[in-house]
Amino acid sequence: MHAIKLEDAPSDSLNNVDPLGRLQQVKLSSSVRDLGKLLGFSHSKIREINELGPQFHHRRFKTDERIYRLGQSFESLYVVRFGFLKTVLRNSEGDERVLSFPMKGNLLGFDGICDNRYGTESIALTDCELIVVPFKKLLTTAQSYRELEQMMYVAISRELTEAHTGISLSSSLKSEARVAHFLESLAKRYAALGYSSKEILLPMTRRDIGCHLGLTLETVSRALSALAAAGIIAVHRKNIQILKPELLHLFKTPLALPQRNNQPAGSLVFA
Amino acid sequence: MHAIKLEDAPSDSLNNVDPLGRLQQVKLSSSVRDLGKLLGFSHSKIREINELGPQFHHRRFKTDERIYRLGQSFESLYVVRFGFLKTVLRNSEGDERVLSFPMKGNLLGFDGICDNRYGTESIALTDCELIVVPFKKLLTTAQSYRELEQMMYVAISRELTEAHTGISLSSSLKSEARVAHFLESLAKRYAALGYSSKEILLPMTRRDIGCHLGLTLETVSRALSALAAAGIIAVHRKNIQILKPELLHLFKTPLALPQRNNQPAGSLVFA
DNA sequence: CGCGAGATTGACTCGGGTCAATAGTAGTGG
DNA sequence: CCACTACTATTGACCCGAGTCAATCTCGCG
């Protein structure tokens, strides 16, 4: 039933795991080209980059560790090499909102750029490894490595725009549609990383999903159950099988049925 | 009753209005220093910038004109010199979401950076004037004007982060709290521009506000009425007077009342 | 003056929040 | 190894807030 191993090592061989399978606090490093690849830039763009040049350290974090805290002074951007995280926005009253669930290739910490301190908090959902990109180093070394700076900014723009789109557009949808949309986008991201897009292991709790979508954990649970009852997915705790991706996609639309009669409609249409 | 004149010229003297008060389609230009000031960077940072250097053209738009369309190929960033606009995100089904209401000093169009075409649409709510910053020019001239490029990126980060925060945090609040929060942040922005923060003229419709906050226009209207009934604001169409800013702020919190009894509570607490 | 877009207000309905009870799962320590 | 515990998830019952539909009002503009 285990969908995928979330801690699966990336394809290259930079890992360092001790005999018990535990992650060690070793520091390894990545070149600008490694970063470019990880961030998903095209090969042509990356080939222009000199292989020699600045190196960026890696850092490992255990489950539930904080990468940085709200208000902490901003020093570095992070690129995920493996593992899963969440970034959280807190308001003064303490209730929180999950902005994103970064995974391999995603960028963290850019919300600190504008006022030199992090405006969010980032927490490891699984053991994970991040590449540390000190912002000052980025600005100074980029004199010679201009490509890097521009790559980073393009990546920032992409991250923010995507997060924006995701959160914003779903807000007008019903709970089931939001959850369906969430699963779909997660599946796409998994697929892009080479994981299965049919068998998904959710690294986050229902509460986290709720905080991300603007729903309560109960509603998320009910929505998953409803999608399961409709035969579109199968749910067993954090293991999700996507049985009918095309119906999942249909579910996103606000059910543009005539719906003038007294039919119950709603979630039973697919039952 | 007119709160402020939205078309008020900025304090410097770069405007060009014909004898009838109409805006002319003249092109004027701004230096890097002008841009820096407009974007709100500190004087010390700006003083380092050579006054000579690249110049950026201005462009005027009439009410309801589109600055750029969704899908259009990305060429320029825009900085608002005066006037009010809205940026809109549309999904495939056509329903829209208002992401932001840019005004003087705000930046537009950065969502096009990541895939070279605009992912949003930007529409003038009033006549307005924008400074055009061609992205290619930014990248190439920035060899010598590195400050400019970095300023722009900091500004982008700030815009996106703020928009993010605004939309995200309000989603857990009740409608009245959302509207109160919206008014408060608008008042702050007005104040920062030197306008009155007590007498506000909303440049957008109730529908726009609703699309921004994830509410319907009726709910926005009701929320405004409720705030008015509580004596916190006075509403006359698009003219809003903020009578008790501190209560407006209190309203933001989810009303942490004991509320165990059968008191009606809700919007009448302040009546 | 009359038209139409925008705004307000009311009545009704229902989706999702809240509270609560239960069950499944993982981790801990004797 | 198993029992205890704490966390996570599921499901039900209830109720309130906001969406929907609709009528009316106001204002600006031709």
Image: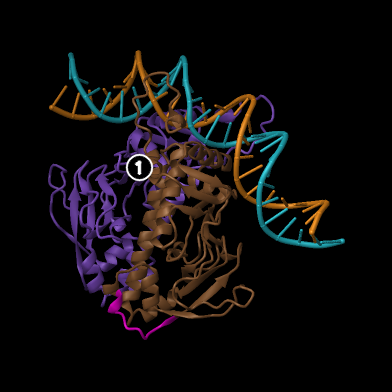
Chain colours: A brown, B purple, C cyan, D orange
Q: Nearer the viewer, residue A220 or B36?
A: A220
- Residue A73 within the segment the image draws in magenta: no
What span is in magenta? Answer: A46-55
Q: Quadrant of the N terminus of chain B?
A: top left
Q: Chain of mark 1?
A: B
SS at mark 1?
strand
Q: Which quadrant of the view contains residue A162?
A: bottom left
Q: Which residue is mark 1?
A: B97
Residue A225 vs A261, above or below: the answer is below
Q: Residues within 10 Å of mark 1 (few under 14, many from 20)?
A: many
Residue that appears at 40% across and 46% down: A245
Which quarter shows the C terminus of chain B?
top right
Q: Is residue A52 magenta?
A: yes
Seen in the picture, residue B242 relative to A101 is either above or below; the reply is: above
Q: Amino acid at mark 1?
A: Arg
The residue lying furthest to the bottom in this view is A52
Q: Which is more toward the observer, A59 or B45?
A: A59
What's the residue at 61%, 62% (across, down)? A64
Residue B203 can be seen, yes or no: yes
Provide residue B65's location: percent of width, then percent of height.
Answer: 20, 44
Residue C16, position as x, y percentages in the image: 52, 36
Q: Is residue A28 left or right of residue A46?
A: right
In depth, the one of C16 and A234 nearer the eye is A234
Which secondary structure type mostly characterizes the magenta part of the structure?
Answer: loop
Q: Residue at x 38, y 85 (%)?
A: A53
Q: Quadrant of residue A195?
A: bottom left
In this view of the protein, can residue B244 be seen by the observer?
no
The image position of residue A55, as x and y in percent, is 43, 82
The number of numbered discs placed on residues in the rendered structure image is 1
